[in-house]
Image (cartoon, rainbow, N blue to C red):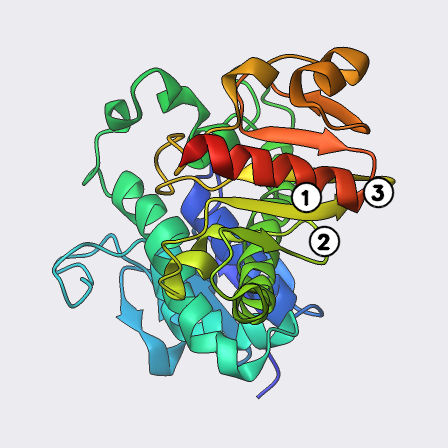
Amino acid sequence: MTITHLVTHSGGFHADELLSSVILTRLFPDARIVRSRDAAWITPGEGRIVYDVGGNYDPEARIFDHHQRPNPLREDGQPYSSFGLIWAHYGADYLRALSVPEEDVADIHASFDAGFVLPVDLLDNGALDPAAAGPLSGLTLPKLLETLKPVYDDRAPGADDRAFLDAVPIARAFVEASIAGKAARRRAAATVLRAIEAAGTSPVLELPMGMPFRSGVEAAGADHLLFVVHPRGDDWALTTIRKSADSFEARADLPAAWAGLTDAALEAASGVPGAKFCHNGRFIAVAATRDAVLRMADIAVAEAG
C-alpha cells in the first residue's frame, strides 16, 4: 500500500510527534503531513498513518496514539509516546533507509531507543521530571524543539502548521546526526580492535586517524593501554584515555610539566623537538611529526608508571 498522508494533531506541538514526523517523512517522502483533529482525518484510513492523535494504538490499522487508557507500555512498564511507538514499528526500516549496515541495525535500533527515544517518551508522559537535568533542564532536546512553536500571541492563520513544518528539518538534523554518530562509532570500533592487535602489549595505541576509541578499548579489555596517538591534519595528537564515559578522569595524565605550554617552551620542558602544544588539562598534546609524538608518548608512559 502507498502511504499518501501522515496525520497528526493540529495546534501546538511537542517533540514526540515532531520526531515521529522525522522518521515517517524519511520513509514516505511523497506523503503529505496533515495536522488535524477532524474525526474524518484522525481515524484509520486507506493510505494514511495516524500518530499522536486518534485515541487508539493499532499497528495493523496504522494508528499510533498513546493518550488513551490503558496507554501502551514497554515490556518494562515504562510508557510510550508516539515517538516510541513509531520507532518501535518503523525504526529499523528508517535505519536501513539511512544505509546503516544490516548487521548493525538491531544494535543501533536498541541503542537509539534507550538513549534518545525513551527520554522523549518519559518526558512527554510526565514520567520523568525535567528538573532531573538540573540547570540544563531548559536545554533538553524536547524543550528546545518546543521553543520552535509560535509565541502565544502569534495568531496568524496557519502559524502553528508553518512552525511545525519548519521544525521538522531541525529535528531531523538531531536524529540523523545521532544515528550517523552511532554508525560511525561501530565502524571505529572495528578499526580500534585491529589497532589493538597490532599494538600488542604496548601502552600506546596508534590509530590511522582521529576517531572514537574508548568503547573499542573497553570492548577489547585492553586495560594496559594508557595513551592514543593519531595523525591530525599536518601534525600528530597524543591523547589520554578516559576511565569511563561519564568521567573526565583519565587512566593516566600527560606530564604536569607540560601543562599549558606551546612550541619552544614545550620542547624545552619535554626535551622533544617538534613538540607543539599541551592542553592545560593534560588530556591532549600535539607534535609536528609521528616520531615526535611517539617520543612524547614514551615520556608520558614513563612518568605514569
Whether residue 52 appears in this view of the structure is no
Relative height, residue 199 to residue 140 (above, below):
below
As drawn, the label of residue 294 is 1
* Pointer 3 or 2: first along the chain: 2
Q: Secondary structure at mark 3?
A: loop
Nearest to the observer: residue 219 or residue 266 = 266
Q: Where does residue 9 sit, x and y in percent of width and height?
A: 45, 49
* Pointer 1 or 2: first along the chain: 2
- Toward which corner of the image does residue 150 lie, by quadrant? top right
Q: Residue at x 37, y 66 (%)?
A: 110
Q: How packed is label 1: few (under 14 Cα within 10 Å), some, or many (20 or more)?
A: many
Q: Secondary structure at mark 2?
A: loop
Q: Where does residue 277 sit, x and y in percent of width and height?
A: 72, 22
Q: How packed is label 3: few (under 14 Cα within 10 Å), some, or many (20 or more)?
A: few
Nearest to the observer: residue 120 or residue 274 = 274
Nearest to the observer: residue 43 or residue 51 = 51
The residue indicated by pointer 2 is 209
- Toward which corner of the image does residue 26 lie, by quadrant? bottom right
Quarter of the image that includes the C terminus:
top left
Q: CA distance from mark 1 to mark 3?
A: 16 Å
As drawn, the label of residue 32 is none
* Pointer 1 or 3: first along the chain: 3
Q: Number of labelled discs?
A: 3
Q: How packed is label 2: few (under 14 Cα within 10 Å), some, or many (20 or more)?
A: some
Q: Residue furthest right?
A: 234
Residue 27 vs residue 251: left or right? right
Nearest to the observer: residue 88 or residue 132 = 132
Q: Where does residue 253 sit, x and y in percent of width and height?
A: 46, 29
